[in-house]
Structures are given as C-alpha cells and as structure tokens.
Amino acid sequence: MHGIILLRPLPENINGERLRVLLNPSKDVDAITDISIAELFAGKDDAFFACTAEACMEVLRYYGIDPAGQRVTILGRSLTVGKPLAIMMLNADATVTVCHSRTPEEDQIKACKEADIVVLATGRTQYYGSPYFRNGQVILDVGTGTGSDGKMHGDLDIDGIMASGEIDDLIYTPVPGGIGRVTTAILLRNIIKAAKKG
C-alpha cells in the first residue's frame, strides 16, 4: 500500500484527529499530517501537497496565470484547501487574504472585489454572486453541492451573475468538470510519487 487518503467527514464515532496523527507521512497523499503541513510551510519541493489546493495551483500554471504580485482572496480556511492554498500562494509570491465564516460579509465582499484571483472553498452552493466580483478576475471554484435544480453546482452563482448583466469578463472554473477533475489527477500523481519513494 503506497498511499492513504482519509475521506471526510468521518462518522462521529471515529476520531479523525487521532487518525490524522497516526497516518504515516510517507503514505499521506492528501497532505494532512503535521509533517506534510510542515513541509509545505518549509517549501519542500518533493513533499506531498493537499490535492485540491495543488489542483488550484496546477490550473493557474496550465493557463499561464502567475500569482506573483497578484492579490489573492481565499474564502474558506479548511485544512484541505484554504490553509494549504494560502501558503502555496504565498510561496508563489502572491499577496493573500483569507476570509472565513467569522469574517463579516462586507469585509468578504471588499476582499473579493479587490482581488485579482478569488478562490471559493466554503461549500455554500451558488452563494457568491455579482456583489462579490468585478470584471477581469480569475475565479477558482472549489465548492460542490446540490443546487435548487437538483444538479451539482459550485459556490459561484454564475447563472445569477450572467443574468444580472453587471459583469461580463470573468475567467472561472466550472463545477462539475473544473478543479475536481484536476484534484483526481493530482491524487494519482501523489500516489505515483509515494510508490517511487518506496
């Protein structure tokens, strides 16, 4: 066995924190152990990075969008996306703002509008509409949930934005078919890396 991933949320009778601590860092392909997190902070090139956070960086690289010198706002502070992605963006020389459930909404809106790149990772399906954005931004939508139409959607309310007519120049990742697909590829890449490490 070369790689282990904990699919969360875990049932209430299972101590997720204990499992996280017990996980062998050499098999930690989703980078949730303390050692993996420390290696991210230290900027180790051969470390495992959280798959979804790394998928965001991979999408930017693929499309030639360099975060260096850019203002990045991340909505969400989870261990799997928000926190590691903030460090990755800092390591890429971006200026980073992280908002979360305790950040007042008016501050979230201001931080999003001022950003060049916005990452939505809160799980608030179709919540973020025109008031949060302006023309010329890049939106990485990490959220997934079931919309009012019974279909899968992200955190971005792209239908509402398009209907408003206020914004017509956004680059955004779709849900489904965007960051999620790249996350799967990153996970497989990490498993191969783990197998090579032995």
Image: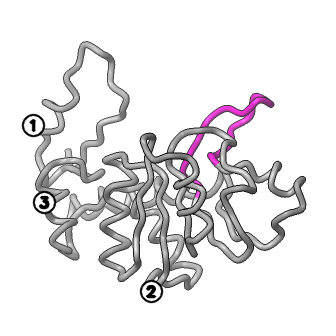
* Residue 180 percent across, percent down from the top left: 54, 52
* Residue 184 percent across, percent down from the top left: 47, 53
Q: How is the image coloured?
A: one colour
Q: Mark 1 — residue?
A: 22
Q: Is residue 53 left or right of residue 60?
A: left
Residue 12 location, quadrant: top left
Q: Is residue 162 left or right of residue 180?
A: right
Circle 2 SS class: loop
Q: What's the distance in space between the residues labelled 1 and 3, CA to CA?
A: 19 Å
Say whether marks 1 and 3 touch (CB < 8 Å): no
Residue at 74% across, 73% down: 135
Main SS of the magenta part reads loop
Residues packed near mark 2 inside 10 Å, few (<14), some (14 to 19) or many (20 plus) = few
Which of the two residues, 85 or 175, is positioned nearer the viewer here?
85
Residue range corresponding to the magenta coloring: 141-155
Q: Mark 2 — residue?
A: 69
- The quadrant in which the C terminus is found is bottom left
Residue at 56% across, 71% down: 115
* Residue 131 percent across, percent down from the top left: 71, 55
Q: Nearer the viewer, mark 1 or mark 2?
A: 2
Q: Is residue 48 above or below residue 34?
A: below
